[in-house]
Image (cartoon, helix red, strand yellow):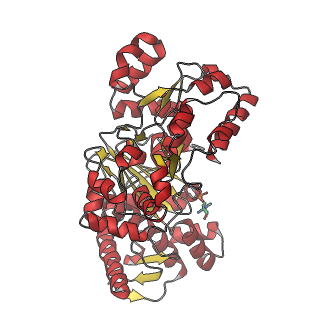
């Protein structure tokens, strides 16, 4: 399906009049955590593609697994717990790879394939991520996995930026060979476009391919996220991305290598109960109307009289509990709140959660911190003014229709030439040396360059003067109450 999608995309762009000969460089992104199992002999097929046929016709027998596991698969709990045990515990695995073992992460997925489909595993010549798989099609050879998407596998030592032998040994024999020993920065040029694309579509033989990365890292690149920014996406789930220099891997978030600068990191936290929970509170407390919701939200004071609540329609990622839990200013559990209190408690608590778990990963608010809000609920300025207060930082919105695609394009534009190619490329064309010059600069200058391309940030709300005082102490209380819920849930399950 994915191969055929590329065939269709190439044809449609040609029909729309794109002159492929003008394309200087290509990068892209793929959904994180999915894996593709190439069958023995597939490399040979990739290197000898016939330009008169579609890719899907030629590659239909090139896969050892007919269906690629993707992020929605959560059937690997057994392998996850075993991998954590193998490394000495969940926190130890998080310290090494940036995340505790997650069912969707590729290490556990590979371990399950090896265990339950051992013949397919043995038949596998190469394992790609969805991102490096698409790059392989364009290169006409196996593309290396990049450091950022590679951080979503529970297999990469994020400090050494190399595969962790301990993790590889647990997940499958000869895994380093199957993954490809080389793992590259997300902005690295990995080769020229394959001759198939030159001959069939008229690409220049000099068109280069930059490593493809995961959709989340590519979004960070597209959002132009700088060291002082927090991107908050208020969609079905509430998600935050942060750029970090000193990350603290924790049990409830992810640390990936930063796609813009591999010396830095990105933190990502995600909570399931976002917009749908806000909608439920709107329906029960505000007549299913956002305007009434906003009026009631604005009618209650910051800090909502010291009340804190947790609304988990679905079992949350952390703490793993479901239900409504309301606490008054003495931290005693109560059964209900007035409608306006319920509304503000819901919004404040959701944002305290993002702030606290961001801090757990190493986020520190500074004088230049900006919150960049996106997602459906970022259309609501009343909600965004609570966000500004809880983080005690100004909130901006911006309009990027698809930040992962934009991020991939920027990575292609500012792609780095690996050392072995630098000398040759400087001599080859002006374009290459221009890209090399751009890539010489540090993150801030990349960021400045990117900001020039994308200036659609709009200030929506500044924090109130008393925000720091109110929400610093509420954040402390939120941590303790959340721990209390987590302990209760552990007691219940044991
Ligand atoms: P997804 O994560 O599915 O891409 P979106 O980012 O499109 O989700 O966000 C959809 C959500 O946005 C809806 O569930 C809705 O609750 C929320 N939403 C839309 N408009 C508003 C609004 N004015 N105020 C608050 N929430 C809103």
Q: Taking 246 as reference, is 212 left or right?
A: right
Closer-to-camera residue (288/264): 264
On the question of residue 363 being in view, the answer is no
Q: Residue at x 46, y 74 (%)?
A: 345
Which residue is nearer to you in this view: 240 or 429?
Answer: 429
Which of the four quarters of the rendered structure image does ligand 1 lie in? bottom right
Which quadrant of the rendered structure holds the C terminus? Answer: bottom left
Residue 362 on image: x %, y % = 28, 55
The answer to which of 351 and 252 lies nearer the viewer is: 252
The location of residue 240, given as percent across then percent down, is: 43, 56
Residue 69 lies left or right of residue 182; in this view the side is: right
Residue at the right extreme? Answer: 15
On screen, residue 63 versus residue 216, left or right, reads right
Q: Position of residue 118 (x, y in %)?
A: 46, 60
Q: Residue at x 33, y 46 (%)?
A: 265
Q: Is residue 100 visible?
A: yes
Specify whether 401 is left or right of 454. Answer: right
Residue 340 higher or lower than 184, as above or below: below
Residue 37 in the image: above or below residue 21: below
Q: Quadrant of residue 148?
A: top left
Percent coordinates x, y for residue 368 in the rendering: 34, 45
Task: Give the answer, above or below, for where 193 lies relative to 465.
Answer: above
């Amino acid at each position: 399906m994915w191969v055929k999608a590329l065939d269709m995309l190439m044809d449609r762009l040609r029909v729309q009049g794109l002159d492929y000969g003008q394309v200087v460089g290509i990068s892209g992104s793929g959904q994180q955590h999915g894996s593709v199992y190439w069958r023995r002999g597939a490399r040979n097929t990739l290197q000898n593609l016939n330009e008169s046929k579609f890719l899907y016709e030629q590659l239909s027998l090139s896969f050892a697994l007919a269906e690629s596991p993707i992020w929605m698969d959560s059937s690997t709990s057994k392998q996850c717990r075993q991998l954590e045990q193998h490394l000495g515990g969940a926190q130890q695995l998080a310290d090494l790879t940036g995340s505790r073992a997650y069912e969707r992460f590729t290490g556990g997925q590979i371990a399950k394939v090896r265990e339950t489909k051992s013949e397919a595993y043995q038949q596998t010549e190469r394992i790609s991520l969805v991102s490096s798989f698409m790059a392989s099609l364009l290169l006409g050879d196996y593309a290396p996995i990049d450091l950022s998407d590679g951080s979503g596998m529970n297999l990469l030592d994020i400090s050494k930026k190399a595969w962790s032998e301990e993790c590889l040994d647990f997940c499958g024999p000869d895994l380093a060979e199957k993954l490809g020993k080389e793992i590259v920065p997300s902005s690295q040029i990995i080769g020229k476009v394959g001759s198939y694309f030159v001959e069939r579509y008229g690409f220049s033989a000099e068109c280069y391919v930059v490593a493809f990365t995961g959709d989340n890292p590519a979004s960070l690149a597209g959002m132009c996220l700088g060291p002082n920014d927090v991107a908050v996406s208020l969609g079905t789930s509430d998600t935050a991305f942060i750029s970090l220099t000193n990350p603290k891997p924790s049990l409830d978030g992810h640390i990936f290598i930063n796609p813009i600068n591999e010396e830095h990191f990105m933190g990502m936290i995600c909570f399931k109960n976002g917009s749908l929970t806000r909608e439920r509170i709107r329906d029960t407390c505000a007549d299913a109307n956002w305007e009434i919701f906003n009026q009631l939200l604005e009618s209650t004071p910051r800090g909502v009289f010291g009340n804190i609540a947790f609304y988990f329609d679905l079992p949350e990622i952390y703490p793993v509990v479901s239900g409504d839990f309301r606490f008054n200013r003495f931290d005693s559990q109560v059964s209900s709140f007035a409608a306006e209190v319920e509304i503000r408690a819901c919004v404040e608590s959701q944002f305290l959660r993002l702030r606290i778990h961001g801090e757990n990963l190493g986020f520190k608010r500074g004088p230049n911190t900006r919150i960049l809000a996106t997602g459906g609920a970022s259309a609501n300025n009343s909600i965004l003014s609570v966000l500004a207060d809880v983080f005690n930082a100004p909130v901006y919105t911006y309009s990027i229709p698809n930040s992962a695609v934009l991020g991939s394009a920027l990575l292609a534009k500012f792609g780095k030439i690996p050392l072995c190619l630098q000398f040759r490329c400087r001599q080859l064309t002006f374009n290459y040396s221009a890209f090399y010059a751009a890539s010489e600069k540090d993150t801030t200058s990349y960021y400045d360059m990117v900001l020039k391309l994308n200036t659609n940030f709009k200030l929506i709300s500044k924090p109130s003067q008393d925000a720091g005082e109110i929400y610093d102490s509420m954040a402390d209380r939120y941590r303790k109450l959340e721990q209390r819920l987590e302990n209760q849930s552990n007691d219940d399950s044991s």
